[in-house]
Amino acid sequence: MKVLLINGSPRKEGNTYVALNEAAQQLQRNGIDTEILWLGTQAVHGCISCQKCRQGDTPGHCVFNDDPCNQIIDSMKQADAIIIGAPVYWGQPAAQAMAIQQRMLYAAADNFKGKPAAVVCVCRRGGATAAFQTLQMPFQMCSMPIVTSQYWNIAYGREPGQASLDSEGMQTMRTLANNMTVMLQKYATGTAIQPQAEEWQPTHFIR
């Protein structure tokens, strides 16, 4: 089993990495393979609603191929779960993390559906709960089981590395990893049966 962790911070080994790495190390101790993918500092596209991912020559992939979106989509064909982490800017997740998440799920929802997911947010002081909720909602819309912890998956720190001093935050990451391990193991036994999905019934309140 393997978990893909997305580092949505422009700092490769900043506090978001510290939090994700704490979870990754605990997953590894539990026998789960991990990969931390850094989005980097290059420009990340927002969705332009071109529908090429559904109607173009390469369905299931974003038309923009010069950022990590399609790499994540392909990686999720083999990965069994995903954790996305981001720093908090102005009470919101870093924009590049939101843009990648929106595009990858819209373009290739079938690669993600049914796979456990979790969100990690890191902030200096405030806004983490709002950012956490923002990143978690798209996973819920894709029928992805949300993995919980002992608290919201939040860590605190300003300067690179300070999050490691947040003892409760690091414990929360380890507990998250343990809970994800249990969920993955239950899926792996074959005892978790996916219910039959109903046909979507969109209601737009337009007559």
Image: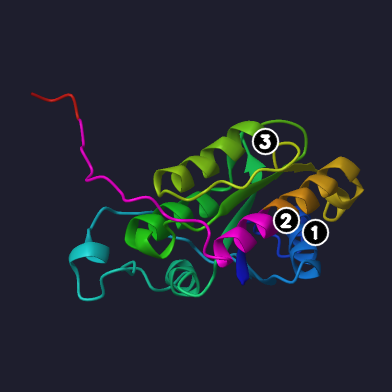
Q: Are marks 2 and 1 in contact (CB under 8 Å)?
A: yes
The CA span between labels 2 and 1 is: 9 Å
Q: Is residue 71 left or right of residue 148?
A: left
- Quadrant for the N terminus, please: bottom right
Looking at the rendering, which quadrant does residue 52 occupy?
bottom left
So how many labels did they put on this image? Answer: 3
- Kind of residue sitting beneath label 1: Glu
Q: CA distance from mark 3 to mark 2?
A: 19 Å
**Pointer 1: what residue?**
22
Q: Are marks 3 and 2 in contact (CB under 8 Å)?
A: no
Measured from the top left, where is residue 67 in percent x and y? 47, 69
Residue with the most extreme left position: 207
Magenta stretch holds residue 194: yes
Give the SS element for disc 3: helix
What secondary structure characterizes most of the magenta part?
loop
Does the segment drawn in magenta span residue 54? no
User: Mark 3 or mark 2: which comes first in sequence?
Assistant: 3
Magenta part of the chain: 180-203
Packing grade of label 1 (10 A; few <14, some 14-19, many >=20) is: some
User: Residue 10 versus residue 22: which sits nearer the camera?
Assistant: 22
Q: Are marks 3 and 1 in contact (CB under 8 Å)?
A: no
Residue 6 is at least partly visible in this image: no
Mark 3 or 1: in front is 1
Q: CA distance from mark 3 to mark 1?
A: 18 Å
Q: Which residue is mark 2?
A: 177
Sequence-first tag of 2 and 1: 1
Q: Nearer the viewer, residue 63 or 199?
A: 199
Q: Which residue is mark 3?
A: 128
Pair 2/1: label in front = 2
When asked about the image quadrant of residue 84, the answer is bottom right
